[in-house]
Image (cartoon, rainbow, N blue to C red):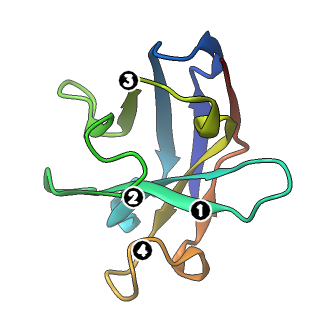
Amino acid sequence: QVHLVESGGGSVQAGGSLRLSCVASGRTSSAVYMAWFRQAPGKEREGVAGIYARAPITYYADSVRGRFTFSRDIGNNTLYHLQMNSLKPDDTAMYYCAARGSYEGDYFDQQTYNYWGQGTQVTVSS
């Protein structure tokens, strides 16, 4: 079992920045891929960014590429950060950290993710 806890959400104005964090505990060795998803009110949950747990290989949704950076903490390999810059009102959503134990499937296929955090709210005002 892998336990995920997100933090760092908040309210900012458009153009601002936030850094979300996700700390993993438990059987972290079983997680091979980490990802951030988000869900805005009235919309389906969507993939935002992903990273291999053991390599600095990242993937981003087109809507955030160039603005968001997903990384693993240098000093703590169970801590992950999502740096979000140039935020837009469309980025307003609940953000969830997720992990999976398999390389199979599309990076943003939610059905392949075994573990989820409770979410952290991001609100961007215009």
- Residue drawn at (59%, 62%), measured in percent from left and top? 46
Numbered disc 3: secondary structure: loop
Say which mark, if any, is on residue 101: 4
In front: label 4 or label 1: 1
Task: Please indicate whether residue 53 sits to the left or right of residue 78 in the image.
Answer: left
Q: Image quadrant of residue 6?
A: top right
Disc on the earlier residue, 2 or 4: 2
Task: Please indicate whether residue 82 sits to the left or right of residue 18 in the image.
Answer: left
Say which mark, if any, is on residue 5: none
**Looking at the image, can residue 83 be seen?**
yes
Q: CA distance from mark 1 to mark 3?
A: 19 Å
Q: Is residue 18 above or below residue 107?
A: above
- Callout 4, which amino acid? Gly
Instruction: Looking at this view, name the residue that lies furthest to the front.
Output: 126
Q: How many marks?
A: 4
| Quarter of the rendering occupied by the C terminus | top right
Q: CA distance from mark 2 to mark 1?
A: 9 Å
Dots 3, 2 in contact, CB < 8 A: no
Numbered disc 2: secondary structure: loop
- Callout 2, which amino acid? Ala
- Callout 3, which amino acid? Asn
Dots 2, 1 in contact, CB < 8 A: yes
Disc on the earlier residue, 2 or 1: 1
Instruction: Looking at this view, name the residue that lies furthest to the right.
Output: 42
Pointer 2: what residue? 61
- Callout 1, which amino acid? Glu
Disc on the earlier residue, 4 or 1: 1
In front: label 2 or label 4: 2
- Residue drawn at (27%, 56%), measured in percent from left and top? 53
Numbered disc 4: secondary structure: loop
